Amino acid sequence: MQRQAVGKNSEKQIIATNIDYAFIVQSVDHDFNINRLERYLTICNTSKVEPVIILNKIDLINQTDLSQLIASVQARVKEIPILAISNQSQKGIDQLKEFIRKGNTYCLLGSSGVGKSSLLNNLSGKQVMKTNTISESTHKGRHVTSHRELILLEKGGVIIDNPGMREVGIANSNEGLETTFDIILQLSADCKFHNCTHTNEIGCAVLFAVDQGKIDRNSYENYVKMEKEKDYFESSVAEKRKKDKDFGKMIKHFKKVKRG
């Protein structure tokens, strides 16, 4: 799994390798963001990793709000397991443990302070990760993981905890975007132009579906933003390769002149 390196337009950053499942963790209070969920899903789909969405800290909201929040995710994210848990009350932890199988490798993805370290302790059955207290004013825990941790679990699985990600940049992920936003891929076959960008073209089936409410507008706008990031990343990579190639030719020519 990889993302665009923070602050580096044409470089990738490896998140983890040889992963079977990714537990995408968000807290249901201040951290909750469906756009970010779609970004994580795109990274997973690009790397052929099975995603599981984990909504943490459910003890901080009531059941009605939780049900509405889950429904909002299900409206945009199809056929992905969604588990609601609490590290404090242990609710939902046993259900999550059912995904742990011997021989499989898992990773935790999420922002700082969403409870990944506490979750890792609950999944392992022991205090393997340091955790900080929760702020009473923000309900957020301070991030304590500064490097990747690999933990062996009781059921024989292996789980990797990653430092919290401030940014989830999209790299070369064409197939990942098509999987995450499969309805856009399906409707694009009905567009008037085969190279339709789904932004301002006449006869665009995707734009028509957005106007008709068949595609969530926020999800569509998130897709367009990530598509632009992907294109920019790919153009930056191509430009960097050209510069490296031109520089190599210059060095080769300089050596040739020097020898002659």
Image (cartoon, rainbow, N blue to C red):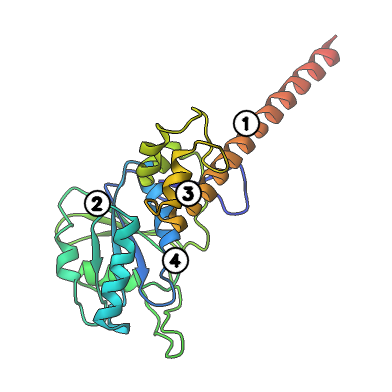
Which residue corresponds to the image point at 58% horizontal and 41% vertical from the top-left?
A: 233
Ranked by sequence position, the earlier of labels 1 and 3 is 3
Q: CA distance from mark 2 to mark 3?
A: 18 Å
Circle 3 Cα neighbour tier, 10 Å, few/some/many (<14 / 14–19 / ≥20): many
Which residue corresponds to the image point at 50% horizontal and 53% vertical from the top-left?
A: 221
Secondary element at tag 4: loop
Amino acid, disc 2: Glu
Q: CA distance from mark 1 to mark 4?
A: 30 Å
Residue 89 image point, x, y percent: 22, 82
Q: Quadrant of residue 248?
A: top right
Image quarter of the C terminus: top right
Ranked by sequence position, the earlier of labels 3 and 4 is 4
Which residue corresponds to the image point at 68% horizontal and 24% vertical from the top-left?
A: 245
Q: Nearer the viewer, mark 2 or mark 1?
A: 2
Q: Nearer the viewer, mark 1 or mark 3?
A: 3
* Rendered image: mark on residue 223: 3
For the residue pair 201 and 241, the one nearer the viewer reads as 201
Circle 1 Cα neighbour tier, 10 Å, few/some/many (<14 / 14–19 / ≥20): few
Ranked by sequence position, the earlier of labels 1 and 4 is 4
Ranked by sequence position, the earlier of labels 2 and 4 is 2
Q: Nearer the viewer, mark 3 or mark 4?
A: 3
Amino acid, disc 4: Ser
Residue at image mark 2: 79
For the residue pair 223 and 164, the one nearer the viewer reads as 223
